C-alpha cells in the first residue's frame, strides 16, 4: 500500500475481490465527496483536519507506508464513531483530509518546508497557505481543461470532469489521481465553491 491509496479505500472495499473501480464508480464517489464537503460545516471540517494533523504528527509516524496509512485510517474511524451519527459521511470527509495530509510532501517539497519553518513563526499556517496555492493551481488547470463542465454544473457533472482530468494528470505527470481529486474537492469546499465553479 502506498500513500496514494488512502482515498480509494472505501471504493476498494466495495469492489469485488480487489477489482479496479470503474470510471463511473470513481465519478460517483467524487460526487459523494463533493456533496459531503458542501454540506459539512467549516468548523466540523476544521476540527477533523486538526485531529488528523495531530494524530499524524504524534501517533502515526511509521517507517512503512502501509502502517502509516493504516494508523490514520483506524484513527479516523474511531473519530467518526465518536463524533458523527453518519459514520459513512464522516469516512468520506476523512478520506479527503487524510489524502491531502499524505499529499503534503508531494505539493510542498522538503526544502520549501524548511524555508517555511525558518521564515514563519506559525509553520502550520504557512504550510496551509502554501498548500492552498498549489491546490488553487490544480483547480485552475481543471477549469481551463476540456474536462471542465462549465460554471453552474451539477456536482455529478463536475465529478465526472474531475475524474477524467485527474486520470489524465496522473498519466502526464508524477501526481497521483487521489492527490489530484482530494486537492480539488477540498479547495472547492474550503473556498465556498468559487474555485472551479
Image: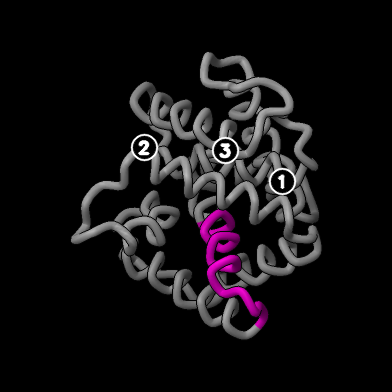
In the rendered image, which quarter is residue 172 located in?
Answer: top left
Q: Residues within 10 Å of mark 3 (few under 14, many from 20)?
A: some
Image quadrant occupied by the C terminus: top right
Q: Residue at left 80%, top 64%?
A: 43
Can the viewer see residue 118? no
Q: CA distance from mark 2 to mark 3?
A: 13 Å
Which secondary structure, mark 3? helix
What secondary structure characterizes most of the magenta part? helix
Residue 77 located left or right of residue 16: right
Q: Which colour style is shown?
A: one colour
Residue 88 painted magenta: yes
- Circle 1 residue: 189
In the rendered image, which quarter is residue 177 located in?
Answer: top left
Can the viewer see residue 159? yes
Q: Which residues are magenta?
A: 83-98
Where residue 167 sits in the image (x, y, percent)?
Answer: 39, 30
- Circle 2 residue: 23
Residue 156 circle label: 3
Above or below residue 8? Residue 78 is below
Compare marks 3 and 1 and give the one earlier in the sequence.
3
Where residue 92 sits in the image (x, y, percent)?
Answer: 54, 60
Above or below residue 2? Residue 51 is below
Q: Residue at left 54%, top 73%?
A: 76
Q: Residues within 10 Å of mark 2 (few under 14, many from 20)?
A: few
Compare marks 2 and 3 and give the one earlier in the sequence.
2
Amino acid at each position: 500500500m502506498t500513500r496514494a491509496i488512502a482515498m480509494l479505500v472505501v471504493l476498494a472495499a466495495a469492489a469485488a475481490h480487489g477489482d479496479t473501480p470503474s470510471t463511473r464508480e470513481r465519478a460517483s464517489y467524487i460526487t459523494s465527496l463533493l456533496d459531503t464537503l458542501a454540506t459539512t460545516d467549516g468548523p466540523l471540517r476544521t476540527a477533523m483536519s486538526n485531529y488528523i494533523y495531530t494524530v499524524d504528527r504524534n501517533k502515526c509516524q511509521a517507517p512503512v507506508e502501509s502502517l502509516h496509512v493504516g494508523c490514520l485510517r483506524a484513527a479516523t474511524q474511531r473519530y467518526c464513531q465518536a463524533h458523527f451519527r453518519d459514520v459513512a459521511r464522516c469516512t468520506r470527509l476523512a478520506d479527503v483530509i487524510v489524502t491531502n495530509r499524505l499529499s503534503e510532501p508531494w505539493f510542498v517539497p522538503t526544502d520549501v518546508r524548511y524555508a517555511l519553518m525558518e521564515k514563519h513563526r506559525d509553520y502550520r499556517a504557512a504550510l496551509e497557505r502554501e498548500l492552498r496555492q498549489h491546490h488553487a493551481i490544480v483547480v485552475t488547470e481543471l477549469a481551463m481543461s476540456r474536462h471542465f463542465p462549465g460554471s453552474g454544473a451539477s456536482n455529478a457533472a463536475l465529478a465526472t470532469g474531475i475524474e477524467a482530468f485527474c486520470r489524465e494528470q496522473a498519466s502526464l505527470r508524477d501526481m497521483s489521481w487521489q492527490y489530484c481529486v482530494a486537492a480539488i474537492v477540498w479547495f472547492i469546499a474550503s473556498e465556498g465553491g468559487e474555485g472551479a465553479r
